[in-house]
Image: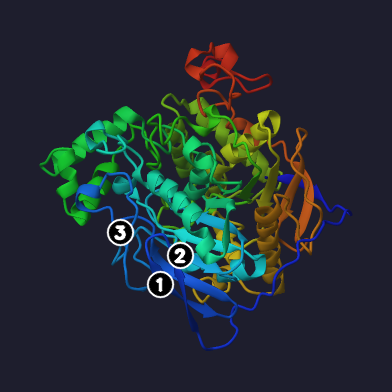
Amino acid sequence: MPTSASPTAVSATAFSPKPASTTGPSSAAPVVVRTSAGAVRGTRLGGVTEFLGVPYAQPPVGPLRFASPRPPQPWTAVRDATTRGAQFCQPGVPGSAEDALSANVWTPDEGGSLPVLVYVHGGAWQVGAGSLANYDGALLAAEGGLVVVTFNYRLGPFGFGFHEELADVDTGLHANWGLQDQMALLHWVRDNAPAFGGDPGNVTLVGTSAGGASAHQLALLPQTKVLVRRVVEISAAHVRAPQLSMTAPHARASAERLADRLGTTVPGLRQAPASVLLAAWNELGQNRPAHSGREFRGPVLDGTTMPGYDHDSPPPDMPVMSVHTRNEGTFFTVPGMSVLTPTPPPATFLRLRGVVRDILRALADDVSEYDVQDCLQVYRDAAALGAFAHDPATVWSEVYGDALLRHRVVRLAERHVRIGRSPLYAMEFTHPTRVPGVGAPHEATSKFLFGTHATPANIDMFGDGPLERRVGTTLRQLVASFATTGHPSCADGPAWPALDEHGHGSLVLGGPDLAVVGRVERSERLRFWDRPGLAPWPTPHHARPRAAMTPAERVPAGAPPPLTDRRNR
């Protein structure tokens, strides 16, 4: 959360890090544990045992495509768990497959009863995998004294959609199969954590981007919130239509269009080759300016797996750590940073006007040139005051990051403090990359949380100097202590209080000062996105549904006027 921060002189009750030797002896020793489906053989190396590619559900193929996940079929022989499983089926990844519902576990003590950290990967509900090397949990497990679990779940058309004709014969569910996989993984952790030395009663759910949104949703669902004790939401892409999620009618129509394209029925989509279905889905998704799911296609409201959007739901009734990065947008707008880059960065202010108009129309159906001009003015004023560079590409990055992520992360955190019943710890991650113009981008946090900023694939961008190591160690200590006790602390930083109603208590992590605590910045940039009609204003959980409110009731005191009111000035 952006802050006007000043160092605090109060020392934290420091979290005591565990020895961080994950390199250790060069020889690896096999270790066998028994899960609910059978025995698995992992590898002990440098004080941590890893178990890779462990099935937590049956392969969702054939009749199980678009079905609720089923427990894995038992096996009798000891199963090898020394190789990462395939990534779930996604574009541009050779070898990705539907048979990919596997978990990876790192534990420093198979005989212990350690806190468990479950990580949900991001990727706009379309790409990514918990099995990626960026999420290697060995260092986090060793330093934090944690059992660390990552996993894959269904993505894209296989994971997120909605149609009654795809109803599961046993559960009746007909939507959000990837979210159902995440629910199944949490039940698997409850049943199997003791086998890996974990305490099933002390599980912390952590997620980034789409994974952060999933973590928030899982912390709300009656079926899963009893399985989770705390939640860490990093750069959460809180779901809403029309920008990130299709409405149920649009999702239903999309499934029917897909079936028509492939010459089959909606139930017949279960028989289509995965590569053909994925290619057809992506082709249909390229042209959807008048429909929901304009940026990404995330979970669909179905009343069960996704009962409501986050802004219309109560906050999680458990301790929350809410994190965002200072430069969320550059991950999406700087070429080469992400496969999800929406458009080439604007080179001129005329082109900047066009892409700003596009992002506003991704959020609202009715956008005028007054709205576009006001948005540009707000951000150019911020640039003139030194908040960021004034060139069109940098302004675009800030607009995009605020519209997609930062506004909702900050506002939902503030709302949690106002109406929630549990503490919320707010953090802005600011440590810059070594690439000019990128700053602290979306997804930078995962490289420091898992300590993979120094891998050959990442070191040129993220570095591995003394300061980077301190930032990584501090972030791991804060998350590990939160997962252990519910109160984040570290050995090399200030005391971090829960956020209060006045905005005090936000931690800034990164840069030469390492960690300072200050106050949430009251930014004109964020206030722009508060306008009713442009973004949903978070409502108290006890309030009437927004559709039942009058226009005056929907506008909080002091909020900017709605877009439609401003057009006639």
Q: Nearer the viewer, mark 3 or mark 1?
A: 3
Distance Cα–Cα, label 2 vs label 3: 18 Å
* Residue that badge 2 annotates: 104
- Residue pushed farthest right? 9
Q: Position of residue 11 (x, y in %)?
A: 86, 57
| Secondary structure category for the residue under label 3 | loop
> Which of pointers 1 and 2 lies earlier in the amino acid sequence?
1
Q: Could you say which is closer to the camera, residue 330 or residue 90? A: 90
* Residue that badge 3 annotates: 73
State the residue at coordinates (59%, 14%): 553
Tell me: 36 left or right of 59: right
Q: Position of residue 233 (x, y in %)?
A: 58, 47
Distance Cα–Cα, label 1 vs label 2: 9 Å
Q: Quadrant of the C terminus?
A: top right
- Residue pushed farthest front? 76
Residue 414 in sight from this viewpoint: yes
Q: Amino acid at mark 1?
A: Ala
Q: Amino acid at mark 3?
A: Gln
29 to 185, vertically: above or below: below
> Which of pointers 3 and 1 lies earlier in the amino acid sequence?
3
Q: Quadrant of residue 421?
A: top right
Residues marked 3 and 1 touching at CB (< 8 Å): no
The disc at residue 81 is 1
Q: Amino acid at mark 2?
A: Asn
Tell me: 72 left or right of 169: right
